[in-house]
Image (cartoon, rainbow, N blue to C red):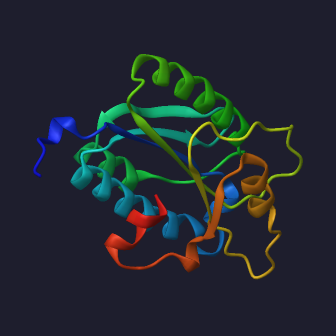
Amino acid sequence: MLRPRSSKPAELWLVIVDASASTRRHGALSKAKGLLSEVFEQARRQRARLALLHATGRQAQWLWQGQKASAALQQWLAELGAGGGTPLFDALQQAAYWQARRQRLHPGETQRLLIITDGRLRDWPALAPSACPALLVDIESAPIRLGRARLLADELGADYRHIDSLPVVAGGLETAL
């Protein structure tokens, strides 16, 4: 039976991008940009809404909050650089608060969380598990890997994947997200 598109539950993909200075090394940010390009295109095709948090410098910044994917995201992606510290925990806190508020406003919406990081963090506070299905993509590409992203994923209750293990084909991420 065919159903109108409007009967399909709304979907929101919340993406947190770690663009700290360490992601410039060994092509990590370049790989992340390729992944993000695919995610943005899939969101557009699937009519999913996007929320995008950029974790770089001193504090995470919202770039997109629940809108449909557009060409503006590809422009931001082309200009994305890395530098400064890793305010990833600030981003995770902001995301949790925003998701809870969004869920109250849109109770029928399905949310998914995608975290892209190299995990190059020293210590971190205790973290609550994600309130929705989450995937942490590890972009650490140094010859000697610290493996902290896997620990972070475990603490958040997120699925863990290294970027090198993701399928190259555009449709391959649909099962991951």
Looking at the image, residue 61 sits to the left or right of residue 86; the answer is left
Residue ID at (65%, 51%): 20
Residue ID at (77%, 58%): 120
Extreme residue in the front direction: 1
Q: Is residue 23 above or below residue 49?
A: below
Q: Nearer the viewer, residue 59 or 92?
A: 92
Q: Quadrant of residue 47?
A: top left
Residue ID at (87%, 51%): 122
Residue 107 is situated, as x and y percent measured from the top left of the image, at 42, 24
Q: Nearer the viewer, residue 142 or 21?
A: 142
Residue 146 is situated, as x and y percent measured from the top left of the image, at 83, 69
Residue 159 is situated, as x and y percent measured from the top left of the image, at 64, 60
Residue 168 is situated, as x and y percent measured from the top left of the image, at 41, 79
Q: How many marks?
A: 0
Looking at the image, residue 110 sits to the left or right of residue 72; the answer is right
Extreme residue in the right direction: 123
Q: Is residue 155 above or below residue 60?
A: below
Residue ID at (56%, 48%): 133
Q: Quadrant of residue 66?
A: top left
Q: Is residue 92 above or below residue 28?
A: above
Looking at the image, residue 137 sits to the left or right of residue 87; the answer is left
Q: Quadrant of residue 27?
A: bottom right
Q: Is residue 14 above or below residue 165?
A: above
Q: Nearer the viewer, residue 111 or 87?
A: 111
Looking at the image, residue 5 sits to the left or right of residue 34; the answer is left
